Image (tube, helix red, strand yellow):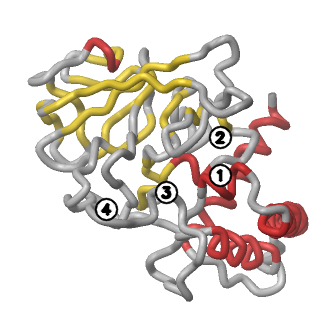
Amino acid sequence: MRDKAGPDRTRRSLIKAAALIAGVVAGGSARAQEGYYVEDPTNPGPGPTDKPPWAGGPGCNPNGNCPGNRPCFLRGTLILTDTGYRPVDTLGEGDRVSARFASFASIERIESFTLERSGPRREWLGHSRPVTVRRGALGEDSPHRDLCLTASHAVFVDGFLMPVGQLVNGTSIVLEPAEGRDTLDFFHIALERHDLLDAEGAPCESLLDPLGESCVPMLSFGGGHGELRSRLRSAVAAVIDRRHSIDLIRDAIEERGLALVRAA
């Protein structure tokens, strides 16, 4: 069967690969410096030299959740509870939320923090920068309206958890400019065990303890070299398809995003 998406995917992947190389040559683009990358643990390769800030270190788990990482929901995000959807900022300890594996689970801890613009250009920087998942980006009606998360917050796609910042494609998953705002309030939800919450109809992780165990497998490139290899695998897939799980998921989300733009 002819791969109809092949030529477009090849062109797109080569452009992305060239941008990655150019970023390294130029001293690292903002995206490369902040490490929006993932690596497929089922296909380990040589270790990269430019790990993202959540890629590891003392006290970090395989998802890259390290002390200081903040996988959180923007104020106003609707979380499914035992009484229906409620804004995350109205929830508290003891409230019961929908959880993929526990059915419903009580919130053990809910905390918030305020993200501020920083740097000489007053930008949103780091692994807590806001990323918006557009309506339907992950699947039919998933999420059912735009969903804003911190970049390190993992979403569940095809059996894996992946930090949403690593799925940014410029169409269906984008860096949120939040124009006119100097601060943003985010909230994270901790349960007894790591699980998947329903946020605006999209499955997103609860807070994972730095030394805890993930409820499902994680995907991670580990660095820019990993993302470059991924882009090159996708570029030649129309001829010989040796893409890994992460490549297939990333490509499918990108292609769905382009289809949503064309249909708009």
Residue 141 image point, x, y percent:
54, 32
Of tags 2 and 4, which is closer to the observer?
Answer: 4
Alpha-carbon distance for marks 3 and 2? 20 Å
Disc 2 to disc 4: CB gap under 8 Å: no
Amino acid type shown at disc 2: Ile
Q: Which mark is residue 181?
A: none
The residue identified by callout 1 is 253
Of tags 3 and 2, which is closer to the observer?
Answer: 3
Which badge, 3 or 1, is on the more N-terminal residue? 3
Alpha-carbon distance for marks 2 and 1? 9 Å
Q: Quadrant of residue 234?
A: bottom right
Q: Secondary structure at mark 2?
A: strand
Residue 253 image point, x, y percent:
65, 52
Q: Secondary structure at mark 3?
A: loop
Amino acid type shown at disc 4: Cys
Viewer-nearest residue: 108 or 32: 32
The residue identified by callout 2 is 173
The residue depicted at 27 percent of the width and 12 percent of the height is 90
